Amino acid sequence: MADHPQEKKLELLTFRVAEQEYSLDIMSVREIRGWTRATPMPHAPSYMRGVINLRGTVLPVMDLALRLNLPSQEANARNVIIVVTLNGSLTGLLVDAVSDIVAMAVDDLHAPPDMATDPHMAVVRALTVINDRMIRVLDLAAVIPNRSDVAA
Amino acid sequence: MSDPIDPMAEIRASFFVECEELLEALQDGLTELENGDGDPETINVVFRAVHSIKGGAGAFGLEPLVRFAHRYETVLEEVRAHRLAPVGDAIRLFFEAADHLSDLVRACRDDLPTPEASSDALLAELDALLADPEPEETKPVDSPPLGVAIDLPDLDPVEEPKVAAPLPVPPDNMALPFPHWLIRFRPESELYKTGNEPLLLLRQLAQLGECHVDCDITALPALTDLKPEQPYLNWTIQLDGGLDEADIRDVFEFVDGLCDLQIDRVDGPENLPPPGSAAPTLAPKIVDLPRAAPSPPATEVPLATVPHHPDRIDEPHKSSTGATAKSVVRVDLERIERLVNLIGELVINQAMLAQSLDSVDLSPHSDAMNGLEEFQRLTRDIQDSVIMIRAQPVKPLFQRMSRIVREASSAVGKEVRLITEGETTEIDKTVIERLTDPLTHMIRNAIDHGFEDAPTRQAAGKPSEGQLRLSAAHRSGRVVIEVSDDGGGINRARVHQIAVEKGLIPVEAVLSDSEIDNLLFLPGLSTAAKSTDLSGRGVGMDVVRTAIQALGGRISIASEQGKGTAFTLSLPLTLAVLDGMVINVAGETLVLPLNVVIESLSLSHDDVQMLRPGAFLVRVRGDFVPLYDLGAMLGYRAARTDYNQSNALLISLDDDTRAALLIDGIEDQRQVVIKGLDDSFYRAPGIAAATILGDGQIALIIDPGDIIAGSTCPRSTDPGLPEKRARYG
C-alpha cells in the first residue's frame, strides 16, 4: 500500500554551496572528486574555474556558487568537484561539500513559485523538504550553459 | 545489456572490412590493367576480388550485391580468357563497375537502399561488351562444357611425357567412362594450417557430378613416426568428363597455392599409361614416385608446364606468392584510442613518480633511480609504437581520389589521367580521414579550373590528356602531399581583377605573384568564368585551407603560367602528439607548437618601439616585427610596461607572418600528448587544445595564428583571474 508500483522514485545528491542546500538527480552524477587546482581558461566567464585532469581527459570545472550568483567561498581541502554528465559531455561543478543521498518519490517534489526575473537564473527545477529543510533541485541543463546560448 | 556483441553482426562487420580490402585490390588491379601491365596474374587478382565479394555477399544474403558482382565477374572472365581486351571503353567501364560495386557494398553495409537503376544501366553496358562472342558464354556457370572446351589434344603432347605418364592412375575397374577429368590433389601443410579441410573439398567435387576418389596412404609412416602436423595423404579423383574445368577449379579456389593440384582431361585409354602400372601395384608405385614425397623438383613439374598452356593462365600457383601479404590484425580504432590515452596516463604517472623520488633525495645511481630511467625509456618507446599503430598508408585515400578524378573529368568532358606517387606513405588515421574533403575539393578545382580544354592544350603543344599528379612523402618529420596539374597555371591578371571587383584588395594594390596566388585562399574568390556543377559554388580554397590548418597543417601554392599549378600540403604525422615548447606566462604553463618557433629573443629596452599606444614592435636584425604580450592577450595579467630583460619568442606562421610573443620563460621542449578541449559551452580564443604535464596539471596549447588574428579586436583583461588566483593559489 505504501509502495504503489506506479510511483516514481528518484534519488537526490544533496550538497552545500555558499551555506545553501542544493541537490541534483543522482543519475546525472558520475563521480565526486577532491579539489585540485584548475588551469584557468583565458577570457572565460568568471564562473568558469578552468580545466582539470580527470584521468587523462580534460574536464571543465565551473564554480557553482559564482554561477548561481552566490558569494564564492574560500577554497579549502573539503571542497569537492561533482562530475556530472549532460548530453554526453562531462562537467565538473565546484561545491563546498557533499551532504547526503536521499531517496524520495517524484510526487514529493514541488515546482518552485514563478518568481524568476532573469530566465538565465531559473536554475531551480523543483523544491522539496527533507527533515524540515528546504532543498532546491537544480536543473542541470539550465546550470550548464550551452555555447549557442552564451553567444546569443 | 549483458553482451552487446552479436556474433553474427561481428562476422558481418568483418566481411565488410574485408570487402574494403578487396575493393582496394580491385582498384589496384584495374589500374595495372589500364597501364598495360602484361602480368597475367593481374586479371586474376581482379577476378578473385569480385568473386570473393560475391561469395561473402551470398553468405549474408545480400542479393543486389551478388547479382551485380556475378555479372561483373562474368565479363571479367572474358578478359581472363583473352576474349576481351581490357582497353579503352572496356577498362573505363570496369572502373565504373568497381566504383558501383563499392557503392553497393557500402549501401549493404549501412542498410541503405541499393541503387538498382544505375546497377541495371551499368550491367546493360557490361553485357554489351559480351555481345560479340557466342552468346551462351555470357552464362558460363550454367553453360554446357562445350563452350569452354579446352584444346586438350594440343596440350597433351606437351604434358604427356612430362607429367601424366609417371603419375599413378586409378585401377580401370573403378574408372569412370572416358572422357573424364583426372584430378590429383596433394595438400601441403599450409592447407591444414589455414583451416581448410580436404574432405569438404571432396564432398563439393562429388556434388558436381559422378566422382571416384582414391586416397593414397602409402606416404603415411608408422604411427610412432607420425608427425601430426605433416601432410601425408594425397588423392586421385576421377570426375565426370562433362563438367566444366572452371567449375572444378572453383572448388579449389580457396586452397590456391596451398596444395599441389593437377587437373587433366583424359579422353580415352590411349592417354593412360599401360594398365600394368595401375590397380594391383598402385600403392607401392606411388612411393617410388617423386610426387609422393614433398620434394621441390617434383612440385615444380606441373607448374613448369603452365606457360605452354594458353588456356591455363589462371593456374593458381602465382596467387600464393602474390597473396602472401604481410599478416595484419584488424583492431577497432577505439581500442587504440584507449591505449593512447592509457599511455598518456602512464607518461604522467611516471613523471609524478620521478618527482616524488626526487624529493626523497636518492643517489642518482641507486636501483630506484636506474629503474626509473629505464621506465622512462620504455614509456617513450611504447608511446612511439602506439603512434605507429595509428599510422596508415595514404593509399585508400588516393584510391578514393582516383574515383573523384574519373567522375569529375567525365562531368566536364576533359581527359585527365591521375598519377599517384608514394601511396605507402603512412600518416595518422585521423589525419587521413580528415583529408578526404579538402583533397576532393582541390582535385575537383584542378580539373574544373586547372586544366584547359583539349583544343587549347593541343594548341599549346601539350598532350590533350591532362596529367594530375598526387604524391605523398615524408619530409623532416611531416607528411607532404602535393596535388599538381599540368594545366594553364593561375591566371594572375584575372585573379587580381576579381579580387579588386569583390573589394578584397584595393584597386591600386601592387602584388607579387605569390601574393596574388595566395589570394585564392581568400573567402569568396572564384576565378571560374562560369560557375559549374563541379566547383565554384561558393565553397572555395579558403575552406580547404581552414581544414588543413585545423589538422595542424600548412598549404602553399606554386604556379607557372602555361605549365601548371601545384598545391603542397604539409601535415603533422599525428594528431596525438605535438612537439611543443613549454613556456611560462604569468605563472601559467603553456605549450607553443615548436614548428612555429624560429628563435628566442632576449629583449633590452632599446629593442622595443611603440607603434601607437598599445601596439609595439620589436627590432629583429633590421626588421620590425609586431610584439604581442602573451600574458596580457590571454588575460592573465596587465600588459607589461617595461620590456627590459624580458624574453620573447620569434614565430613564423604558414603565411610567413612573423611575430614576437612576449613570455616570462622557457621551461622545456618536449613532445606532449594532445587532449581535445570540450568546447561545448566555452571556446577560449587563442587556445587550440590542452595537454597534461608531468605533475598532472593541465597546460593549454596555444594556437599562435588565432592569437595574432585575434589581436586586432581589443580584449579586456579578465579581472577574475588574479582574484581567483589570490584565493585558490
Image: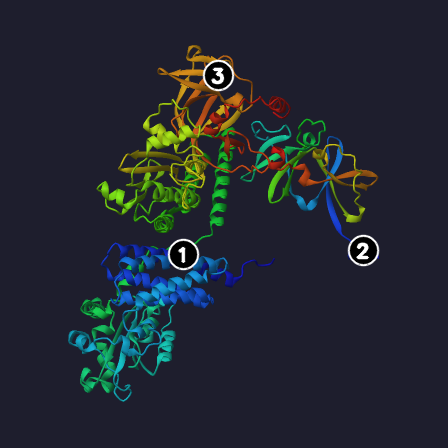
Which residue was labeled with disc 1?
Answer: B20
| As drawn, B167 above or below B131 | below
Chain letter for mark 1, please. B
- Chain ID of residue with mark 2: A
Q: Secondary structure at mark 1?
A: helix
Of tags 1 and 3, the one toward the viewer is: 3
Q: Which residue carries the number 2 mark? A: A3
Label 2 CA crowd tier, 10 Å (few <14, some 14–19, many 20+): few
Which corner quadrant of the image does residue B128 belong to? Answer: bottom left
Q: Nearer the viewer, mark 3 or mark 2?
A: 3
* Residue B490 placement: quadrant: top left
Q: Which class describes the residues within 10 Å of circle 1: few (<14), some (14-19), or many (20+)?
A: some
Chain of the residue displaying label 3: B
Residue bearing mark 3? B615
**How far apart in space, not on screen, are marks 1 and 3 (Cα)?**
56 Å
Q: Residue at x 64, y 33 (%)?
A: A62
Q: Position of residue B288 (x, y in %)?
A: 20, 77
Q: CA distance from mark 3 to mark 2?
A: 72 Å
The quadrant the C terminus of chain B occupies is top right
Residue type indicated by callout 1: Glu
